[in-house]
Image: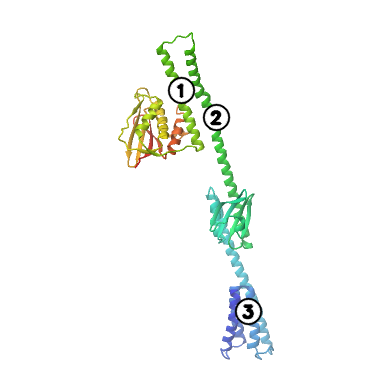
């Protein structure tokens, strides 16, 4: 259209200029001027506007600059040859200029396609989930308003990735759509894609389909991993129940059956000893069942946290009393002048009870575990210190997993530290392991001080 406008305006203007230039302008000069205008129109607008200008220049040259003037008659054979040569030359030059322009455009398109494909390959190779990046690259490559990958969810469409605004929410919101895979569609909002660009668009669509498939496979892998972990926990739980529940039950039954035996004569001290032992086994069962219930609540997300200011010394004392330990087992040194901390008192008691019980079971005889606390700024660190064998650095992550025992002699099913870590996270507290100076392990739980 620009070439046609140039021809429509330039031909009359050029003719007027030549007519007013005087007698020095002959047919050759006029035709040469018209050739120049024709080439300019071909460069700007292509072959068809330039051909029209060439024919119009042929007519104007014949009418205004070929004797006899302002008639269609041409007296000289040389003038006829000049007019025909002009028309032929103008058309041929216009065709060559147009061909060169088309080849230049094709080369530019090829470079653009190569750049787009290279960017496409780089995006796919560099990203674990390239869907969002691919959608953004597609919108920029085709200068679109918005691009979205939609997936059918029942009767509605869900956007898996989107770039640009407003984001299409249904296939009808776009000017163009492409099917990616079953139930998924690519929606383009903006100018219609030219036919020449369909090949690049198809390449993008193919990579988007692969990205969707990769995302689906990764989700299935995560679900499979979760099922495998659940099966592993179930197997460990069955193993724990079969041994750590049945053993104390069998012990309790044997002791109580002995007490009921009329032929057995137990004095008062022996009877008290048996009852105390049975109570200890009951406490052991109660702690195990409590940990199993806590782990179940953590796994299902059914844990409710009631955060409020609590006194750490009172909570720690309740935890030790619930465990039934005495001062020769636990050195509880928490002054009542400590600032309150923000926590759920019941959950924090469970955390401390598990950590203290673990420390006592791994402490050597005659060396009680120690419970200390210090405040640094807005954080209180509670240290549960034992002088046992310690935990190797490479095992400090695995000991917090369910059913992981530190050794085979300390007892328990390996839930204490896992429950302590889960409850600590629910309390927004940080639980970590450090070395005890000299020998042993120190569990450190960091709590926020109540303001």
Q: Viewed as shown, does residue 213 lie left or right of 318?
A: right
Question: If the image is split into quadrants, where does the C terminus sit?
Answer: top left
Toward which corner of the image does residue 38 lie, by quadrant?
Answer: bottom right
Toward which corner of the image does residue 25 lie, by quadrant?
Answer: bottom right
Determine which residue is flagged by label 3.
53
Mark yes or no: residue 392 visible.
no
Q: Viewed as shown, does residue 83 lie left or right of 236?
A: right
Determine which residue is flagged by label 2.
235
Mark yes or no: residue 88 visible.
yes
Q: Viewed as shown, does residue 121 lie left or right of 416?
A: right
Q: Residue 138 carries which label?
A: none
Rounded to the nearest angstrom, the CA distance separating label 3 from label 1 is 107 Å
Rounded to the nearest angstrom, the CA distance separating label 1 from label 2 is 24 Å
Residue in the image at 63% along x and 55% along y: 178
| Local crowd size for mark 1, using a 10 Å CA cut-off: few (<14), some (14–19), many (≥20) | some
Rounded to the nearest angstrom, the CA distance separating label 2 from label 3 is 89 Å
Determine which residue is flagged by label 1.
282
Residue in the image at 37% along x and 31% along y: 316
Q: Which of 419 and 322 is in front in this view?
A: 322
| Local crowd size for mark 2, using a 10 Å CA cut-off: few (<14), some (14–19), many (≥20) | few
Which is in the foreground here, disc 1 or disc 2?
1
């Amino acid at each position: 259209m620009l070439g046609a406008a140039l021809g429509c305006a330039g031909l009359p203007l050029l003719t007027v200029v030549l007519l007013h230039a005087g007698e020095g302008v002959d047919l050759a000069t006029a035709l040469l001027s018209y050739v120049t205008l024709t080439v300019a129109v071909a460069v700007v607008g292509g072959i068809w506007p330039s051909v029209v200008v060439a024919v119009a220049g042929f007519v104007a040259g014949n009418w205004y600059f070929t004797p006899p003037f302002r008639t269609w008659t041409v007296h000289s054979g040389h003038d006829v040859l000049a007019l025909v040569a002009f028309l032929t030359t103008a058309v041929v030059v216009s065709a060559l200029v147009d061909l060169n322009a088309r080849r230049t455009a094709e080369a530019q398109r090829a470079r653009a396609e190569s750049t787009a494909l290279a960017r496409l390959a780089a995006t796919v190779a560099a990203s674990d989930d390239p869907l969002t990046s691919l959608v953004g690259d597609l919108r920029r490559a085709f200068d679109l308003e918005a691009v979205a990958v939609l997936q059918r969810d029942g009767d509605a469409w869900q956007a898996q990735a989107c770039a640009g605004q407003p984001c299409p929410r249904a296939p009808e919101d776009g000017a163009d759509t492409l099917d990616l895979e079953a139930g998924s569609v690519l929606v383009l909002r903006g100018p219609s894609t030219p036919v020449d660009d369909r090949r690049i668009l198809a390449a993008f669509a193919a990579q988007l389909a692969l990205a969707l498939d990769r995302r689906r496979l990764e989700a299935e892998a995560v679900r499979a991993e979760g099922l495998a972990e659940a099966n592993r926990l179930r197997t460990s739980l069955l193993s724990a129940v079969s041994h750590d529940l049945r053993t104390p039950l069998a012990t309790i039954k044997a002791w109580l059956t002995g007490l009921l035996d009329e032929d057995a004569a137990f004095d008062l001290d022996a009877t008290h000893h048996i009852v105390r032992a049975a109570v200890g086994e009951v406490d052991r069962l109660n702690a195990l069942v409590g940990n199993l219930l806590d782990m179940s609540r953590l796994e299902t997300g059914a844990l409710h946290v009631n955060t409020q200011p609590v006194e750490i010394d009172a909570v720690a004392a309740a935890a030790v009393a619930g465990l039934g330990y005495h001062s020769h087992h636990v050195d509880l040194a928490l002054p009542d002048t400590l600032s309150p901390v923000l926590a759920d008192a019941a959950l924090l008691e469970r955390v401390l009870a598990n950590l203290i019980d673990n420390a006592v079971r791994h402490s050597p005889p005659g060396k009680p575990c120690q419970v200390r606390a210090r405040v640094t700024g807005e954080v209180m660190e509670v240290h549960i210190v034992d002088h046992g064998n310690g935990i190797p650095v490479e095992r400090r992550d695995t000991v917090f997993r369910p059913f992981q025992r530190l050794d085979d002699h300390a007892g328990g099913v390996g839930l204490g530290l896992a429950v302590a870590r889960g409850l600590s996270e629910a309390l927004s507290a940080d639980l970590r392991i450090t070395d005890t100076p000299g020998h042993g392990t120190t569990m450190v739980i960091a709590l926020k001080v109540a303001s």
